[in-house]
């Protein structure tokens, strides 16, 4: 009887061990299966982001005859981009336009988005409708927005000049996209209109994350509205402001679709609407180099410079803001 019990106990332990082993294998298989799900996304990211980045870096070190790669030239394409005419003039011209793009977006788009988000946060009448209304333009394709505003700004039959005429303000009528003094400003303001709703949502989320206890404590201490905003709300809104600043910086220096939709790839009129992304497109694909054989190499060099510039200043700004948050 004791021998039977010992045998039965050994079999039970063996069966239990086998069950535990099987369960462990199933858990390990599930764990490895979970790691397979990101593979399609990683393949797409590698194919369309990582590979073009390294390809552009490689192409920038070679001379090109059309689309045929020539001999290795080292940093010559980078040197030509900054020193050889007309490439250097066009580069700095486009770079200045990107700086203006960023500055005006920060003032008009993000400044107005901050104020509108605060108004909605204070729960004014119709605030729910305002959230939807401000975000509606974002639902449209940027190409559609570009063509729509190109019609609105048309000097002959565009809605803007027609409205100015009906109001008796004919002196303010302009060829908005045909005047070098107004073309880029018009495009930037259209971009601000398009991106306003996204900024409102980001800032509104920041407002709603502020603890009500702090606001109530400020009111009990006798702080007025201005003091509440400058000493309590804005410091607590730093994460949202940081996010919008970084996104605006990246978007401003990658501005292409709206400019292309409204003015094409030539930066008309007289390169007054050139941005670095538009200039890159024209260098690499648009045949603007007068038959030069280094178009692809110069375009690749410009793409590398643009990437490094955005990455460096974004990282620098994030590091600065993180230190500032710690100090606060």
Image (spheres, rainbow, N blue to C red):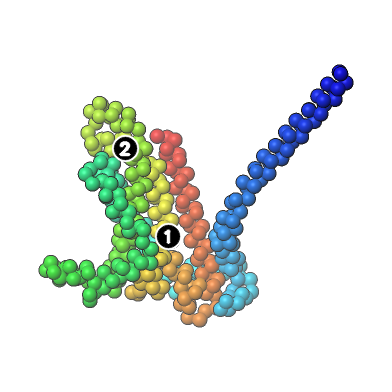
Residue extending farthest front: 1
> Helix or strand or loop: what does disc 1 sit on?
helix
Quadrant for the N terminus, please: top right
Label 2 near label 1: C-beta < 8 Å?
Answer: no
Relative image position of residue 78 (x, y in whole percent): 53, 67
> Where, by quadrant of the figure, is residue 49 drawn?
bottom right
Looking at the image, residue 300 sits to the left or right of residue 191; the answer is right
Looking at the image, residue 226 sits to the left or right of residue 170; the answer is right
**Residue at the spot x=32%, y=59% of the render?**
137
290 shown above or below 158: below
Residue extending farthest right: 3
Q: Which of the two discs, 1 and 2, sits closer to the camera?
A: 2
Relative image position of residue 272 (x, y in whole percent): 34, 70
Say how many tags the image has: 2
Task: Please name the residue that numbered disc 2 is placed on.
Answer: 233
Looking at the image, which is closer to me, 78 or 214? Answer: 214
Looking at the image, which is closer to me, 34 or 1? Answer: 1
Looking at the image, residue 19 sits to the left or right of residue 268; the answer is right
Label 1 or label 2, whichever comes before in sequence order: 2
> Helix or strand or loop: what does disc 2 sit on?
helix
**Residue at the spot x=57%, y=76% of the render?**
67
Estimate how packed mark 2 is, as few (under 14), some (14 to 19) or many (20 or more) residues with alpha carbons within 10 Å: some
Relative image position of residue 155 (x, y in whole percent): 24, 74
**Residue at the spot x=41%, y=73% of the render?**
265
User: Could you tell me how far apart the alpha carbons at marks 1 and 2 are, in whole angstroms?
Assistant: 29 Å
32 shown above or below 216: below
Task: Please name the residue that numbered disc 1 is placed on.
Answer: 253
- Would residue 284 be visible to someone looking at this image? yes
Looking at the image, residue 310 sits to the left or right of residue 156; the answer is right
**Residue at the spot x=28%, y=38% of the render?**
229
């Amino acid at each position: 009887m004791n021998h039977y019990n010992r045998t039965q106990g050994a079999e039970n332990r063996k069966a239990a061990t086998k069950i535990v082993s099987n369960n462990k294998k199933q858990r390990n298989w599930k764990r490895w299966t979970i790691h397979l799900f990101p593979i399609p996304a990683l393949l797409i990211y590698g194919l369309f982001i990582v590979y073009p980045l390294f390809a552009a870096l490689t192409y920038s070190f070679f001379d090109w005859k059309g689309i045929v790669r020539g001999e290795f030239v080292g940093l010559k394409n980078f040197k030509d981009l900054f020193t050889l005419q007309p490439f250097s003039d066009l580069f700095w011209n486009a770079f200045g336009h990107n700086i203006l793009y960023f500055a005006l977006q920060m003032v008009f788009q993000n400044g107005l988005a901050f104020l509108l988000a605060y108004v909605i946060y204070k729960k004014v009448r119709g605030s729910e409708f305002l959230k939807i209304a401000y975000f509606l333009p974002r639902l449209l394709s940027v190409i559609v927005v570009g063509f729509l505003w190109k019609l609105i700004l048309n000097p002959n039959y565009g809605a803007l000049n027609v409205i100015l005429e009906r109001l008796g303000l004919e002196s303010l009528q302009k060829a908005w996209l045909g005047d070098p003094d107004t073309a880029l400003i018009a495009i930037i303001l259209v971009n601000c209109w398009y991106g306003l709703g996204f900024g409102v949502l980001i800032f509104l989320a920041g407002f709603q994350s502020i603890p009500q206890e702090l606001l109530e404590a400020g009111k009990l201490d006798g702080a007025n509205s201005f003091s509440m905003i400058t000493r309590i709300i804005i410091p607590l809104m730093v994460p949202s402001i940081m996010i919008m600043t970084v996104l605006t910086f990246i978007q401003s220096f990658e501005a292409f679709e709206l400019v292309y939709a409204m003015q094409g790839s030539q930066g008309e009129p007289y390169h007054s609407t050139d941005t670095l992304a538009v200039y890159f497109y024209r260098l690499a694909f648009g045949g603007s180099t007068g038959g030069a054989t280094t178009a692809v190499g110069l375009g690749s060099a410009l793409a590398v410079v643009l990437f490094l510039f955005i990455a460096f200043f974004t990282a620098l700004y994030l590091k600065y803001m993180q230190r500032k948050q710690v100090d606060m």
